[in-house]
Image: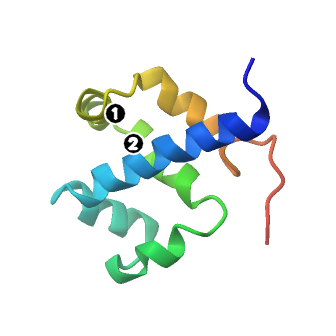
Amino acid sequence: MANAASMREEAETIAIKALGFVAADPELLPRFLAITGIEAHSIRLAAGEPGFLAGVLQFILAHEPTLVRFAEETGTPPAAVGKALRALPMGDDNHEHSI
């Protein structure tokens, strides 16, 4: 069984792929920015904030066609996205929330 550190590293890798997927899509990126309230020039800074990567995965998971396309384009099983979300800070209620 994988340890927590390797699970989190794998989850972060999936979330970074998801962020790249969203950023490269001319339809998804504006929707993501509008929903999150983040400005395009602030994404890099926001990516370091606790919960940001979980938010990216929540965005992908919230729309099944987006999830399916992400999975197909990146070779990531759809179930791995939900698993990754749960392994990230603020991805579920089992993590401490930073202020």
- Residue shown at 39% from the left, 47% from the top: 17
The quarter of the picture where residue 72 lies is top left
Identify which amino acid the numbered label 2 is placed on: Ile
Q: Is residue 12 visible?
A: yes
Q: Residue furthest top?
A: 1
Q: Is residue 4 above or below residue 21?
A: above
Q: Position of residue 39 (x, y in %)?
A: 37, 79
Left or right for 3, reference 68: right
> Would you say the residues marked 1 and 2 are in contact, meaning their CB atoms lie under 8 Å apart?
yes
Image point (69%, 51%), residue name: 90
C-alpha separation, residue under disc 1 versus residue under disc 2: 5 Å
| Pick the front one: 35 or 29 | 29
Against 16, residue 32 (above or below) is below
Residue 40, how many percent across, how many down?
Answer: 33, 77
Residue at the disc numbered 1: 67
Looking at the rendered image, the quarter that the N terminus falls into is: top right
Residue 60 numbered tag: 2
Quarter of the figure with residue 98: bottom right
Callout 2: helix, strand or loop?
A: helix
Side of 31 relative to 48 (left or right): left
Q: Residue at x 58, y 40 (%)?
A: 11
Is 26 left, or right, of 37 in this rendering? left
Residue 87 in sight from this viewpoint: no
Compare marks 1 and 2 and give the one earlier in the sequence.
2
Residue type pointed to by label 1: Leu
Disc 1 secondary structure class: helix
